[in-house]
Image (tube, coloured by chain):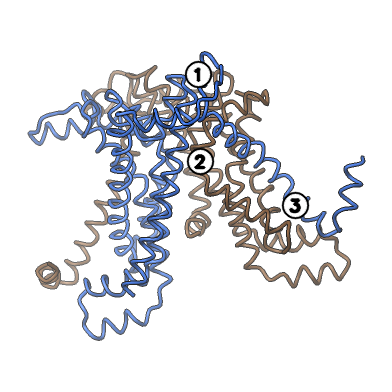
Amino acid sequence: MSAPQRGFWDSLAPGARRAFFGLVLAAVCFLFAFPVLWLMLTSLRPESGVYYVHKGLEFTLDSYKQIFSDERLVNAFINSGAIATLATFFSLLVTVSSGYMLSRFRGRIASTWFGVIYAMRCVPYITWVLPLYFVVQSYGVYDTYIGLLLPHIAVHICFFSWLMKGFFDGIDPSMEHAALIDGCTRWGAFYRVALPSAIPAISALTVLCWLFTWNEFLFAQILTGRNTPVITVVMSQFVSEMGLQWNLMSATAILALVPAFVLTLFGQKYVIQGLKI
Amino acid sequence: MSWRNALRNSFGEQQRFMLLLIAPAVTLLVLFQAVPIFIGGSASFRDWMLTNPKKTWVGLAQYISVLTDPAFLEIVLPNTFLFMFASVTISLAFGMALALALNRPFRAQKVVQTILLLPLMVAPVIAAIMMRWMFNDQFGIVNVVLETLGGEPRAWLVDRWSAFAIIVLTDCWLWIPWFALLLLAGLQSLPKSPFEAAAIDGTTPWRVFRHLTVPMLRPVIIVCIVIRSIDAFRTFDIVWALTGGGPARQTELFSIYAYETAFVFLDFGKGSAAAITGGLIILVVGLLLYRILDHVRKVSL
């Protein structure tokens, strides 16, 4: 199979080879970017032009204006942003200490906790998401910030603790021992010495955790109702409610993409690092 | 504060520090993971209708009703496995091709890499809506292009298999870049010397790929396949936003089935039993995949 292809490839001049390679890559990039570009184009068309996006040249920002005047949508954006930010902050706070503990200490407590995390990590997500509805309702926090925030923090505990343990394992503890001898408290050794050296890893997780929470759907679908709309749920309801207003739909989707896009662009280095985990 | 004294007496200073470090994580894990698991497990053995919560203990009846439901056996399970297989193989193949293409320096590399990051930030729900618009039967761009090329426009999401193909396509769009970037990272961390030796010997690119790249990259490939398969198995959002499991519940995957049983048909007992059945299948599949792929590695090395 490979021989004729190689013959074709070898018969090309180096310049042609480069051009061919470039062309294929350009086509791939186009295919990956096209859906998003198409969405952007649709969002800029007036309501009448949306059915023939490929024809005509009228563009308008009306759809975006309409979104910003829709209270439910604005609320959804604010809620999604607030929950993603708070969930990221608290997830990292909770798991950085738990990971530190797993990395630095041995003994009964550490091994039990590690066992619990490992077992919980193996329990498939879907088996505890459905009952979460009753749990959150019985705690009296259904359809509130707290009710969505706390499960979002909980969902990351096992995986992130495990990752954080790995990060701290890679950091030499002798500096902390030195700090302890110099009269630093255990807490001081943790957040003055160990924490700063884990910052690159923590940044990677920050970006990934924020993106994950911003994009999450199933939790929000089950745990929120009318009072706490978040953007992914509102958009999925859009499809049935406003099935024909594709310009509004697209504009909302583009607006939902912007924060993630900006964050990824600035955190690209960390995201790629984080993906390697 | 007697519990405090008790704590102080039974644990040393270091133990107290350890417990304090994990206390918030333990609390949240118990409240929002252990308790739901317990409730779900208990619900799966009960007749628990959301409209009429008598919660009578019925033993294994709910599991039996799930496992004898023709919709579950003939549509949901085959769909789920087919989806997992198709999505993972296609994404792996294309991801690998892209990673190999990107694994040599060229001018626009940074740009290509940034474009590949694009699908990774798109929420699955948004990706699904995007595809739904592009494959819209009346105004979608796909039908417009088809018509200009002389083809027949189709109602893509009305037919079971074309709807299923679009779900797979959406998933691939979302995940090919993930495979590509992970495999690229793997490729870049491989030692250079075996490849240089192969180049001196004049080995064909295919042989280099087959006998050098793949075996050396195998750990990364295994991790990718296992993680992605487990995730693909429980896919919910793209199906929900693309087809809602339709037409006529023909494209349901197992998490949609569990969700619908619990929250649309309000049978929480059966829904929980379905979720747990699926959960057990994921565990077994994950373990088997890991074993098989690991075995392949040992044999072929």
Residues at marks 3 and 1 on the same chain: yes
Distance CA(mark 2)–CA(mark 1): 22 Å
Q: Residues within 10 Å of mark 1 (few under 14, many from 20)?
A: many
- Which element carries disc 1, helix, strand or loop? loop
The colour one sees for chain A in the rendered image is brown
Q: Which residue is mark 1?
A: B49
Q: Are marks 3 and 2 on the same chain?
A: no
Q: Secondary structure at mark 3?
A: helix
Chain B is which colour?
Answer: blue
Residue B145: quadrant of the picture? top left
**Which type of secondary structure does the marked residue at label 2 adopt?**
helix
Q: Give the residue at the far top of this rendering.
A: B52
Q: Residue at x 36, y 28 (%)?
A: A43
| Tag 2 and tag 1 share a subunit | no
Would you name the residue on which mark 2 appears? A125
Q: Which residue is mark 3?
A: B21
Please state the horizontal and vertical placement of residue B238, each as a whole percent of the image: 37, 35
